[in-house]
Image: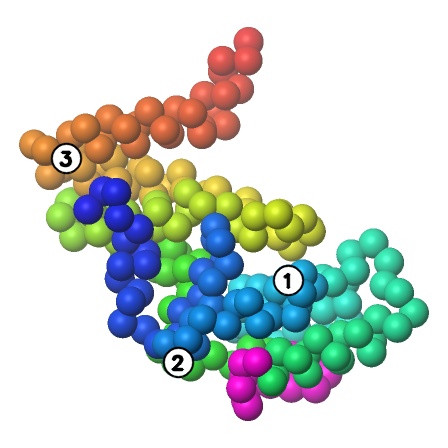
Amino acid sequence: MANQDLGETLAEHWETRIHLCGRLTVRIGGHRVEEALPGRQGRMLFAFLVAHRLRPTPRSVLLEVLWPAAAPAAAESALAALLAKLRRILGAGWIAGKHDIRLALPTDAWIDLEAAQEGLHRGESAVAMNEWARAWGPARVALHIAARSFLPGYEAPWIAEIRCRLDDVLVRSLECVAASALGIGGPELPAAERSAKRLTELSPIVKAATAY
């Protein structure tokens, strides 16, 4: 179990699932479509809309997402073309709005970023009640997702912000895994030791202390 990608294992029954951490993968209706996304900018735009799907985004913000330094003269037309291509690839109704854009995913869609947050919440809640076995699975899901880089190979201010939030999920999920493994004991004790070691490597407090 420790060597499996728990996030993918638990997501197999969803017809729509999206991985933004590690390799970008997009499965819609059981079919992979990430290779059809319109180029580098199309993938970045899609990833932004997925990560911010709970609220509409003004087109002016999307222009900054695609061109953080300075938008070219034909930026509006280029954005409209990218959105049109995404609509054709994803299907009718997925890209909602004209001035404020929102990605309207199916209600049962699985997204790794959201699964990591949910797993962390469930894990921390179980740990707070000393329910170690109940904390183990969700905390592992959060850990396996957060251990991957968000959109590797891409750089932008909004990407750095999400990576920072994911780093927090990683540290807190390691704490949950360590606590649940200690609580379960027995064969899980090595997992607690590995998590504790990784925490000392990641902790800003430990890094600052060892710098002196």
In the rendering, at what x and y percent does residue 200 appear?
A: 39, 24
Gap in angstroms between the C-alphas marked 3 and 2: 37 Å
Going by the picture, which residue comes out furthest to the top?
A: 212
Going by the picture, which residue comes out furthest to the bottom?
A: 92
Q: Residue at x 45, y 21 (%)?
A: 206
Tell which circle, 3 or 2, labels the residue nearer the N-terminal end. Answer: 2
Find out whether residue 21 is within the magenta segment: no
Q: Residue at x 49, y 15 (%)?
A: 209
Which element type, helix, strand or loop, lies under badge 3?
helix
Q: Which mark is residue 29?
A: 2
In the rendering, at what x and y percent does residue 179 appear?
A: 22, 37
Q: Quadrant of residue 189?
A: top left
Residue 77 visible in this rendered orientation of the protein: yes
The kind of residue on which mark 3 rests is Glu
Residue to which mark 3 is pinned: 188
Q: How many marks?
A: 3
The kind of residue on which mark 2 rests is Gly
Residue to which mark 1 is pinned: 44
Q: Quadrant of residue 41?
A: bottom right
Q: Which residues are magenta?
A: 89-101
Find out whether residue 91 is within the magenta segment: yes
Relative depth, front residue between 21 and 208: 21
Q: Residue at x 88, y 73 (%)?
A: 74
Which one is closest to the eye, mark 1 or mark 3?
1
- Horizontal relation, residue 7 to residue 91: left or right: left
Please say which color scheme the image uses. Answer: rainbow
